[in-house]
Structure formats: structure tokens, C-alpha cells
Image (cartoon, rainbow, N blue to C red):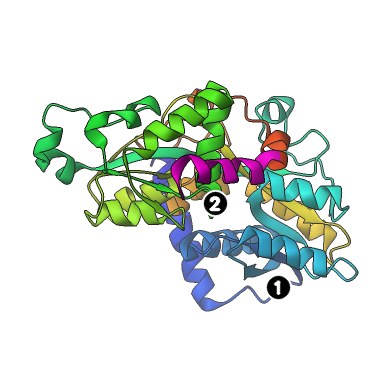
């Protein structure tokens, strides 16, 4: 039996147990805040953690990162949560600077793991999955469009500038989405700022729509309301694998990998359970669940990505300076609006 086949069996058993309720011998609990709303993934994580440890999981879904962080800040004098399960590094850095999370040296966080950027050396941020900006296209629409006869789908950032794609590209708005902001800031780190604004102006000629949400380009392109889009890899895989949509996709090089991290809330009610939960997120079980049930890239080198996706270590990335990006975000967004007349 293959590793993934065995894993599927384990997940099925875990979900059946979930329907029956938590084991009666589960004496402890851990309170987790998460932005993940894929029920198959969160249910599998909760049930398997309880099965392995006897600790119940109370999971509160808070879809927006900013709202999740604000809640932890509001509760700082009497913390209610033990773990923030998933947020971007910049938000976790904010909580660290405010003294609201505490360090822990997780079992999986070797020197190599830290050097790859999947965790910080001080033990405040614990990466457990990643997503990457992805170019995608509607295969049927691309093939049937007479203006695209003989034209290859774009597989690189520069490829999006092909004049043949005028009015055919949909991307997230950087003023309202992290995905859009990451995409345009990546161009700055890839090309230098002056050349990045030149790139922005040229790409603007090909834009059909800037969307208010990061996932909407995928929805529009799979409906045939656009031909080409840019979005997070997880949203693209949810469409192709999860919904069977006929989308082609490519992971451009000179990219930015967004590693999502967990952290332990300082002064949380169940610190021992919190540390066990962090170790569990980086275990083989969750590393297999992240791609299979949530279409995310695992950070563990021992777990392969989904078919068609590269491993994290094989993606060529720009040197993405999170501090610079955070400090210049407002300026970049204003300049983008000026360059694109938005």
C-alpha cells in the first residue's frame, strides 16, 4: 500500500470517529484560532490530534488574518487561545514584537528547516505549509480563441506581457489582497523598482480585470469569464483537482513562496497542549493532509507535493525582504494605483 493510500485510510477513519464524537478519555484541550475553512482538512487535523494525544481541539475559524491578530491583541490580558494555527509571517512578526507569542523549539525544526525559511531561529514562528503565486489559464478557451492561434500559454512573469494577451488577464488587486501585493512587490525584488513599474504599466495593457479578492481570478477563469489569471496555488489546485476544472497552470520562477506559520499564544490556558499541537502540525500526518485535503505545499522534504506541483526547494525565488515590504506597502499600493489609473 502506498503512503498516500495508507494516509487516505487513516483520514477516513479519523473522519468517521469525528462523527461519533471525541473519545471519552480526552481529558485536556487546546484552543486554536485558524483562518482555514476547508472542513476536510480542519476536521482531519482535529480528530487525528485527539486520537494521538487524548487532547480535545477547540477550533475557532477567523477567516481574515487581521481580525485574528486583532482578537489576540484584544485578549492579551486574559488569553483565550493557545495556538494561532495559520497566518503569514508579517502578521506573526507583529504579534512577536508586541510580546504576544512565546518561543518553542519544535521537534521538526532542524537547522536546515530554519535555513530554508520555514521557521525562525528563535522559535516563535513554525511553518507548516506554503502557497505560491501561480499563472493559470482556461484550456478550452485558450484553444478556441482564434486570436491566440499559435501562441503558447504564459509560464513566466514576462510571458504575461505578450501583446496577444491584451484584455485577457485577470489578477488580484494589490490594494485589497495580499496575493496582489505579493505579486507586484515580487516584481520589484525581481527587476528593481524602476523596471518593476515599467513592467506594471505594460502588464496593465493586458489586464481585463483587477479583482477585490485573491480567489476570484480562479473563479472567473474557470467560468470562462477570463482566459488567463494569477492566483495562489492552493486556489488553482482546488479548481483543477478538487472541482475537475480544465485549467492549465505554471509556477513562474523568480517567485515568492508564502510560508504560513503557527505560533503559541503567550499566557494561553494550555501551554503543554499548545507545544504538542505545534509538533503535530509539522508531523508527516499533517504534512500529507495539507496537500491532499487543502491543496497546499508541504514544508517537509519527506512528503511529495501534489502531482504537477514542484517541491518548495525547487522553486527559484527572489530575495523577498518582508521588513522592506511591510514598511513600503502603503507607498507601493499608491504608486500602483497611479501607474494603472485605479
Up-down relation of residue 215 to residue 109 (above or below): below
**Neighbour class for label 2 at 10 Å: few (<14), some, many (≥20)?**
many
Q: Nearer the viewer, mark 1 or mark 2?
A: 2
Q: Is 225 left, or right, of 319 in this rendering? A: left
Q: Position of residue 194 (x, y in %)?
A: 55, 25
Q: Which residues are magenta?
A: 328-342
Is 331 inside the magenta-drawn segment? yes
Q: Position of residue 277 (x, y in %)?
A: 71, 55
Q: Are marks 1 and 2 in contact (CB under 8 Å)?
A: no
Q: Which mark is residue 175?
A: 2
Task: Tell which of 8 and 336 is nearer to you.
Answer: 336
Task: Please tell me whether mark 2 sits on a helix, a strand or a loop.
Answer: loop
Earlier sequence position, callout 1 versus callout 2:
1
Q: Residue at x 53, y 71 (%)?
A: 18
Q: Which residue is mark 1?
A: 25
Q: Say which quarter of the image contains residue 135.
A: top left
Up-down relation of residue 169 to residue 74 (above or below): above
Q: Residue at x 33, y 29 (%)?
A: 161
Q: Residue at x 80, y 33 (%)?
A: 121
Which part of the image, by quadrant, shows the N terminus?
A: top left
Majority SS type along the magenta span: helix
Report the Cα–Cα distance between label 1 and label 2.
49 Å
Task: Tell which of 139 and 21 is nearer to you.
Answer: 139
Amino acid at each position: 500500500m502506498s503512503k498516500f493510500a495508507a494516509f487516505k485510510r487513516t483520514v477516513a477513519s479519523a473522519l468517521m470517529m469525528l462523527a461519533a464524537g471525541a473519545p471519552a478519555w480526552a481529558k485536556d484541550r487546546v484552543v486554536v484560532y485558524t483562518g482555514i475553512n476547508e472542513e476536510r482538512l480542519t476536521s482531519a487535523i482535529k480528530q487525528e490530534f485527539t486520537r494521538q494525544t487524548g487532547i480535545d481541539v477547540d477550533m475557532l475559524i477567523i477567516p481574515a488574518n487581521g481580525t485574528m491578530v486583532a482578537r489576540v491583541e484584544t485578549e492579551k490580558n486574559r488569553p483565550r487561545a493557545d495556538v494561532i494555527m495559520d497566518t503569514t509571517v508579517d502578521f506573526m512578526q507583529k504579534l512577536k514584537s508586541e510580546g504576544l507569542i512565546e518561543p518553542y523549539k519544535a521537534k521538526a525544526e532542524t537547522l536546515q528547516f530554519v535555513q530554508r525559511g520555514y521557521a525562525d531561529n528563535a522559535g516563535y514562528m513554525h511553518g507548516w505549509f506554503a502557497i505560491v503565486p501561480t499563472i493559470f489559464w482556461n484550456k478550452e478557451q485558450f484553444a478556441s480563441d482564434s486570436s491566440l492561434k499559435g501562441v503558447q500559454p504564459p509560464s513566466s512573469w514576462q510571458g504575461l506581457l505578450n501583446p496577444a494577451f491584451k484584455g485577457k488577464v485577470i489578477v488580484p488587486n494589490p490594494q485589497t489582497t495580499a496575493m496582489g501585493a505579493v505579486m507586484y512587490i515580487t516584481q520589484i525584488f525581481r527587476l528593481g523598482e524602476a523596471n518593476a513599474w515599467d513592467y506594471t504599466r505594460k502588464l496593465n495593457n493586458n489586464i481585463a480585470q483587477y479583482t477585490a479578492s485573491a480567489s476570484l481570478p480562479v473563479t472567473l477563469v474557470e467560468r470562462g469569464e477570463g482566459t488567463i489569471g494569477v492566483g495562489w496555488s492552493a486556489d488553482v489546485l482546488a479548481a483543477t483537482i478538487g472541482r475537475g476544472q480544465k485549467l492549465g497552470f505554471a509556477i513562474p520562477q523568480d517567485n515568492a513562496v508564502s510560508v504560513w506559520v503557527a505560533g503559541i499564544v503567550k499566557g494561553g490556558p494550555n501551554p503543554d497542549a499548545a507545544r504538542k499541537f505545534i509538533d503535530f502540525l509539522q508531523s508527516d500526518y499533517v504534512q500529507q493532509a495539507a496537500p491532499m485535503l487543502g491543496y497546499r505545499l508541504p514544508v517537509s522534504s519527506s512528503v511529495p507535493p501534489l502531482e504537477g506541483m514542484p517541491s518548495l526547494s525547487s522553486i527559484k525565488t527572489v530575495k523577498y525582504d518582508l521588513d522592506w515590504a511591510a514598511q513600503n506597502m502603503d507607498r507601493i499600493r499608491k504608486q500602483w494605483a497611479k501607474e494603472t489609473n485605479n
